[in-house]
Image (cartoon, rainbow, N blue to C red):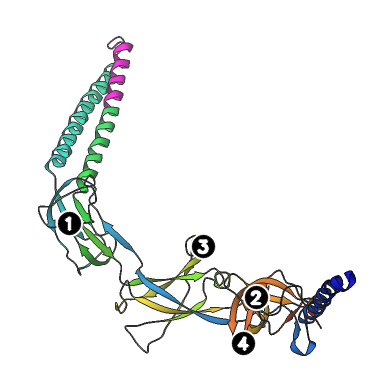
Amino acid sequence: MKYRTFGPLLLVPVLLISACHENNEKDKVRKVMPKSEISIMKLSNGSISSSVQLPGVMQPFEFVPLFPRVNGFVKKVLADRGSSVTAGQVLVVLDAPEIEEQAAAARLKYAQARSGFLTSKDHFLRLVETSATPGAVSAFDLSSAKDKMDADSAMVAGEYAAYMAQQTIRGYLTVSAPFAGIITERNVHPGALVGPSIRDAKPMLVLQQMSKLRLTVDVPEQYAPQVNDGDSVHYWVNSMPGQVFAGTISRSSQSLNNNYRSETIEVDIANAREVFKPGMYAEVVLRVKGSQNAFVVPKKAVVTSTERKYVILANDRIAHWCNVSEGNEKGDSVEVFGDIKKGDEILTSANHEVRDGQVLR
């Protein structure tokens, strides 16, 4: 009776072991991909030459906001928004009576010092002439006269420097154009108080050069090493549909922006007829040469997830996920970079179902 009671219970472990064995066999079958479902290629170095279209913005070749260097009242404004000005042209005249008075006082001090120097110099020269007669002039008197002349000469030099400094400050009352261009902004009128001591003050005028512009483009990090000074570019602007313009890269920043991970390049644009305006957006097409250190693979060989991009190596028929980054694309091919080398075998058509470590028959 005891054996009949425990007999069914003894059969349960045997059934569980049998079921587990069958599941393990099924798992082994699932972990092995049939040869008919895989396609393998060997990696070899290659590059893809293509083009990339990036946005750009036109900026004036030279740009300057004009602020006053001294405190004063605006006396005259000789240019307005849209005025075309030449280099050296007077734009704003300021009025500051105290500066005029300081300049006049400095001039007077210089004149007094110069007069004193001329007197001491004449006195010294007369003593030198008189000293030709033995005993007529003592050596002490002659030496004292020379020292007085030298001191007055130094005084003249100091007063002249102070006078010229005041003249320079007086010159700040006249604001001139540092280069030829167009006045694009005006913020002052006659009678306004302006000066460097006024907080949050806007510039009196803004001057921009229009005859020559800079087309600036931010090139992403992956393309930056493939773009060089002197490379040709093509661009167009939305305000001129159907027109494509050509240019060359004039200069580059030679460094990457930390915020956007991009390198800024500039294309100089001759704009004598003022066809383009600063601030215009342009679409710029750059030629990218590709990298000689890249590997060219089919796009289907790269698996993209929310966290990574990878290819599946098939060395020794064992699947291994290898993180990569993509480069240039053309057609169904793409450049990849990563911990891969020439001669490695990869799946040409990879997907998420192929697990890391899976056996490939």
Q: Nearer the viewer, mark 1 or mark 4?
A: 4
Nearer-N-terminus badge (2/1): 1
Which residue is at 51% across, 64% downward? Answer: 261
Q: Which mark is residue 332?
A: 4
**Residue highlighted by disc 3:** 256
CA–CA distance in space, label 1 to label 4: 63 Å
- Quadrant housing residue 215: bottom left
Specify the quadrant that holds the C terminus: bottom right
Residue 252, position as x, y percentages in the image: 49, 66
Q: Which of marks 2 and 1 is in front?
A: 2
Q: What residue type is labelled 3?
A: Leu
Nearer-N-terminus badge (1/4): 1
**Residue highlighted by disc 2:** 336
Q: What residue type is labelled 4?
A: Asp
Q: Which amino acid does label 1 sit on?
A: Val
Q: Compared to 342, does 190 lie above or below?
A: above
Query: Label 1's element?
Result: strand
Query: Label 3's element?
Result: loop
Which residue is at 28% across, 31% downward? Answer: 158
Would you say the residues marked 3 and 1 are in contact, meaning their CB atoms lie under 8 Å apart?
Answer: no
Range of residues picked out in magenta: 134-152
Query: Label 2's element?
Result: strand
Q: For residue 195: magenta?
A: no
Between 202 and 349, which is closer to the camera in this rendering?
A: 349
**Residue highlighted by disc 1:** 92
CA–CA distance in space, label 2 to label 4: 13 Å
CA–CA distance in space, label 3 to label 1: 40 Å
Would you say the residues marked 2 and 1 are in contact, meaning their CB atoms lie under 8 Å apart?
Answer: no
CA–CA distance in space, label 2 to label 3: 21 Å
Would you say the residues marked 1 and 4 are in contact, meaning their CB atoms lie under 8 Å apart?
Answer: no
